Image (tube, rainbow, N blue to C red):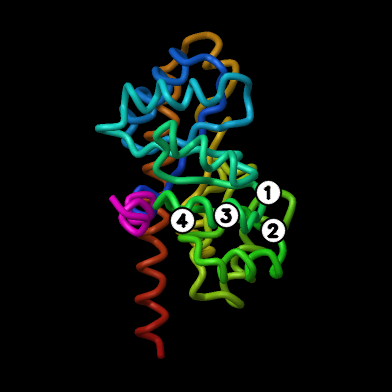
Amino acid sequence: MNQLGTFARVKDAGIIPAVRSCDEKEAVRAAEAIQAGGIPIIEVSLAPPNALHVLEAVVMAHAKSILIGAGTVVDAEGVRQAALAGARFIVTPGFSAAAVDKAKEFGLAVFAGAMTPTEVQLASASGVEAVKLFPCFATGGARYLKALRGQYPATELIASGGIGLDNCEEYIRAGACAIGVGGEIADFESLAAGSFSVLTVRTRRLRSAIRSARGLKKTLSYNVGESR
């Protein structure tokens, strides 16, 4: 699968669930629980200790049925390590031209982090598949994303940071092609307690909310068109 195919799967799902864990078995079970909730996509954070081994374990267990990427990647070396561990996409917290170039070298899709209009413009111009607007909660939320969509209509924006069931629909209606979700699905407490069924329920609810928001957005677009 090429970069565009990878992004198409992410965009279709509308959610990138992130798992942050230093325990391989825990992450493997979390990925399985999230898939059971209807989202066969997982972003494994490279921030915790032992993260590369965790990523490798998830890939070994689920690569045939789940699209697996690496998150919190900050440089080209992180991209190289993630690619060798089996990641199919890269998510960065901020923009790194070197990381983007290395991801292209390995044929991986890149969702590059940005916050300001300048950063969004730089990331978009580098040829990434999408720009991850992060952290959304600190930038004005959905209203800020909508404003950026007005200035950069050709740039695909993924909303991330402080997004959950209570506000995810706002971001989709504002123009996000997908949302990034971490603790709102796979929180540390549930992982530590082995409460993986909770992850399934949360994933299912978020998936339903995203579909609902997309349906409403389409209806609103049709109504605007008819009124002209």
- The residue tagged 4 is 104
Query: Which comes sooner in the sequence, label 1 or label 4?
Result: 4
The residues colored magenta run 1-10
- The residue tagged 2 is 115
User: Would you say the residues marked 4 and 3 are in contact, meaning their CB atoms lie under 8 Å apart?
Assistant: no
Residue type of the residue flagged with mark 4: Lys
Please check the rendered image and state whether residue 4 is part of the magenta-colored stretch, yes or no.
yes
Q: Main secondary structure of the magenta part?
A: helix
Tally of numbered discs: 4
Find residue 40 and report its horizontal and vertical position in percent: 33, 36
- The residue tagged 3 is 112
Measure the alpha-carbon separation of dots 4 and 3.
12 Å
Residue type of the residue flagged with mark 2: Met
Q: Residue at x 40, y 27 (%)?
A: 201
Please check the rendered image and state whether residue 91 is part of the magenta-colored stretch, yes or no.
no
Helix, strand or loop at mark 2: loop
Q: Depth check: give the residue in front, 22 or 50.
A: 50
Measure the alpha-carbon separation of dots 2 and 3.
10 Å
In the figure, residue 38 lies in which quadrant? top left
Measure the alpha-carbon separation of dots 4 and 2.
22 Å
Find residue 101 and report its horizontal and vertical position in percent: 54, 57
